[in-house]
Amino acid sequence: SPAVSAIPEGVADVPRSASGDVTEPNMTVSSKAKSPTGVLSGQDDAVLSEWVVTCTRTDGGTVASPVWHNYNQTIYVPAGGSAPLQNFRIFPAEYLQQPPLYQLFPENGGFDKETGRTNIRQRLHIEIFGKTVGGKAVSVTFDVNLNFFY
């Protein structure tokens, strides 16, 4: 079953003045047998095609960015192998213009109304769903912490 490795530790800073999607610069999705003695075959090759990103606040605020469903990124992971990914989209640019992040613009006050801070921290819980060539459902989950500021 696929697993994610090589996700950077810590909080990534995202300036609110950025206009593009938030991407993960480098990560690797690896395929490993569930059992250490398990043997994988070509039927265990995985095609991951649905990303669901759920945001939660990690700074004491309660209003988080909406859940994002992305079907526009497909990853092929060979059984027992890996798929290196670069600049992979994890948060859409249009969410930078929506609650709660829009509050950080100077014209909207420049601070979060809940916390009084000029930054907003969110944890992105990322779930990637797909199937093996043999038809078994597979999924991968990982978290990324982001610090949004203007």
Image: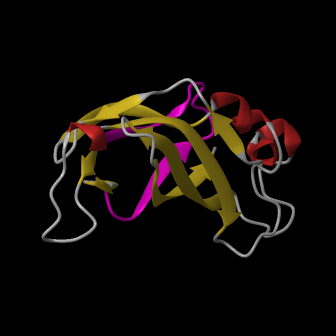
Relative placement, left or right, of 41 versus 120 is left
Q: Quick check: 81 above or below 72? A: below
Q: Position of residue 24 (x, y in %)?
A: 40, 41
Relative placement, left or right, of 1 versus 38 is right
- Look at 77% across and 70% down and name the residue there: 61
Q: Decide which of 21, 15 is in the foreground and name it.
A: 21
- Look at 22% across and 57% down and name the residue there: 32
One can see residue 82 in this view = yes
Looking at the rendered image, the quarter that the C terminus falls into is top right
Q: Which residues are magenta?
A: 8-27
Q: Is residue 19 magenta?
A: yes
One can see residue 7 in this view = no
Q: Position of residue 18 (x, y in %)?
A: 57, 31
Q: Position of residue 108 (x, y in %)?
A: 87, 42
- Look at 69% across and 41% down and name the residue there: 68
Q: Quadrant of residue 59?
A: bottom right
